[in-house]
Amino acid sequence: MTVIQWFPGHMAKALRLVKEKLNLVDIVLELVDARLPESSRNPQLEQLLETKPHIMVLTKKDMADPNVTARWLRYYESKGIPAVAVDSQHGQLSAIEKKINVVLKDKLALRESKGIIQQRVKVMCIGIPNVGKSTLLNHLVNKNVAITGNRPGVTKAQQWLKAGKLMSLLDTPGILWPKFEDQEIGKRLALTGAIKDSLYAKDDIALYGLEHFKQTNPKALQEKYKLTDEQMQLSNVDLLLELTKKMGFKEDYDRASERIIFDIRQSKLGRYTLEIPQLGGE
Ligand SMILES: Nc1nc2c(ncn2[C@@H]2O[C@H](COP(=O)(O)OP(=O)(O)O)[C@@H](O)[C@H]2O)c(=O)[nH]1
Ligand SMILES: [Mg+2]
């Protein structure tokens, strides 16, 4: 995965780059991970986007619990933020185009009334590392990467890529840092691989994962690791010790933790979403 250390200087620079590029586009696609939509948002982006039309794109929907994803979409729409869920690996151009048509309805109608129908909507993707920006971009622009022209940006010439009939996409997505606000958010980001592995204790994250599946999908946990009903009653720590033995790692809890984290990241315990929308907002 992309390894980025977010020192304050880096953060300021990333923010500045995004700000500069914002001026070049009509609309922003804010990418978040459908398994942890709020935790994978950048804490400053919402403020930055106050005056810019934007769409929340919940990526990796194929890995998230579909019912919870539907709730998240309703939640954002209820807050006035248009939202769509995608599997970036499979493009989903039309779903995004549909949303853009709704959000920019007035602007597009105005252009049409002025006879400007050829002009494409300029779009930029923004998100934290590993959320699926490059993957989505590649799929949206398809195989025949067509460069529609160079436009001078503030720092360097920007390349625009044609995506479908409607969009011109900035070739480089905006990268921002995730929320580091509290332990819980950090654990969600770590479990899904959004922050680099050396930033947390593996056993903490594995225990967090075990607890999540115990609460939300104990059957998947039991089946994956062939656990008895008695083992399912163990505390998380005792369960981790038991799993370490079962996996043949003797007392190497770190290795067992790594394996558990890997399994969860690879959806080996099925689809999951680590956070649900706050009820009041629904
Ligand atoms: N299952 C699934 N995997 C995805 C999706 N989008 C991205 N990925 C994977 O997530 C990882 C990070 O994606 P990448 O596009 O490099 O993220 P970026 O850092 O935001 O550019 C890669 O291993 C992708 O294959 C998605 O919608 N579904
Ligand atoms: Mg990338």
Image (tube, grey):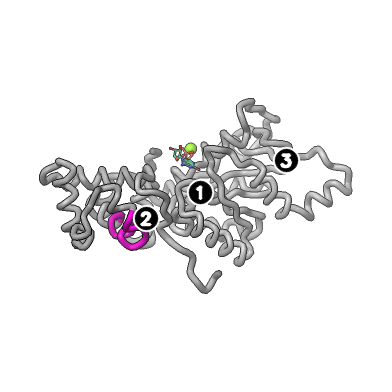
Q: CA distance from mark 1 to mark 3?
A: 23 Å
Question: Residue at horizontal 38%, vertical 61%?
Answer: 181
Residue that label 1 marks = 61
Q: Which region shows up in magenta? A: 209-219
Whether disc 3's CB lies below 8 Å from ligand 1 is answered no
Say what secondary structure mark 1 lies in. loop
Residue drawn at (61%, 62%) of the image: 77
- Name the quadrant of the N terminus: top left
Given the image, on which type of amino acid does mark 1 rest? Lys
- Amino acid found under the numbered disc labelled 2: Arg
- Membership of 26 in magenta stretch: no
Horizontal side of 281 relative to 108 (left or right) equals left
| Residue identified by numbered label 2 | 188
Q: Residues within 10 Å of mark 3 (few under 14, many from 20)?
A: many
Q: Which residue appears farthest toward the left when viewing the image? A: 250
Q: Viewer-proximal residue, 224 or 156?
A: 224
Q: CA distance from mark 3 to mark 2?
A: 35 Å
SS majority, magenta: helix
Within-10-Å neighbours for mark 1: few <14, some 14–19, many 20+: many
Q: Which residue is mark 3?
A: 166
Q: Looking at mark 1, is its residue's CB closer than 8 Å to ligand 1?
A: yes
For the question of whether residue 14 can be seen, the reply is no
- Given residues 153 and 102, the one toward you in this image is 102
**Residue 91: percent from the left, percent from the top?**
59, 38
The amino acid pointed to by label 3 is Leu
> Where's the C terminus, which quadrant?
bottom right
Marked residue nearer the N-terminal end (1 or 3): 1
Mark 1 and mark 2 in contact (Cβ < 8 Å)?
A: no
Based on the picture, tell me whether residue 217 belongs to the magenta stretch: yes
Q: Residue furthest top?
A: 144
